[in-house]
Every structure is written in C-alpha cells, then in structure tokens.
Image: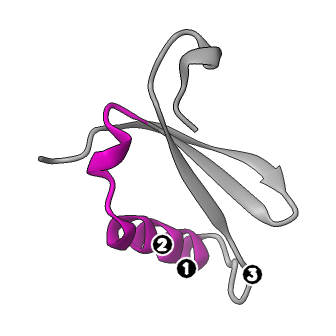
Amino acid sequence: KRPKLFYMTQVATKPPTFMISVADPDAISTTYQRFLLNRLREDFAFGGTPLKMFCRKRGKDPDKWGK
C-alpha cells in the first residue's frame, strides 16, 4: 500500500523534529522515513545534525491523533 502524506511541519528545534500528517502511519516504513530525513539533511543543510521524525494519523481533533 502506498503511503499518503498530507503535510510535514517542524514541531521542535533542539533537535529538529518533524511531524508528518498521514492517512495510515503504519504505511510509512522505516526506510522511507530515513529517505525523507536524508533529503531534509541534503536540501536544508542539516549536515551532521540529528533529526527526529514521527507520523500521526490525519484528523481534525488533535486529541485523536496516534502518537
């Protein structure tokens, strides 16, 4: 099943942490997350900076998002 990503936002700065809103968090594999993190490092000069990323199920009520 192909993952459906809606948007990604930076939610913290130390270390840079990104949240991706997705249709199904289980559809995002570890290797795909690693790919996205490496692209962020290349495109935005995060060179040796440790980055964090997590996926949440898209929903209108933030209390119902998966953690």
Left-right relation of 8 to 28: right
Label 3 residue SS:
loop
Quarter of the image with the C terminus is top right
Mark whose residue sits in front, 3 or 2: 3
Which residue, as the protein is rendered here, is positioned at the far right?
14
* Label 2 to label 1: alpha-carbon separation: 5 Å
Q: Nearer the viewer, residue 48 or 24?
A: 24
Residue named by callout 1: 42
Residue 9: horizontal and vertical position, in percent?
63, 42
Please say if 39 is above or below 62: below
Mark 1, Cα crowd under 10 Å, few <14 / some 14-19 / many 20+, is few
Residue at x-position 58% and y-position 10%: 61
Label 2 close to label 1 by CB (< 8 Å): yes
Residue at 72% x, 78% y is 50
Where residue 60 appears, as percent x and y from the top left, is: 52, 10
The label on residue 49 is: 3
Q: Residues within 10 Å of mark 3 (few under 14, many from 20)?
A: few
Q: Identify the element where label 2 is drawn.
A: helix
Magenta-drawn segment? 22-43
Residue 28 percent across, percent down from the top left = 33, 54
| Residue at 16% across, 47% down | 2
Q: Is residue 34 above or below residue 62?
A: below
Proximity of marks 3 and 1: CB atoms separated by less than 8 Å: no
Identified at 68% across, 86% down, the residue is 47
Q: Amino acid at mark 1?
A: Glu
Tell me how far mark 3 sits from mark 1, CA to CA.
Answer: 11 Å
Q: Is residue 14 magenta?
A: no
Residue picked out by circle 2: 39
Sequence-wise first label, 3 or 1: 1
Closer mark to the observer between disc 3 and disc 1: 3
Determine crowd level at label 2: few under 14, some 14-19, many 20+ residues with C-alpha closer than 10 A: few
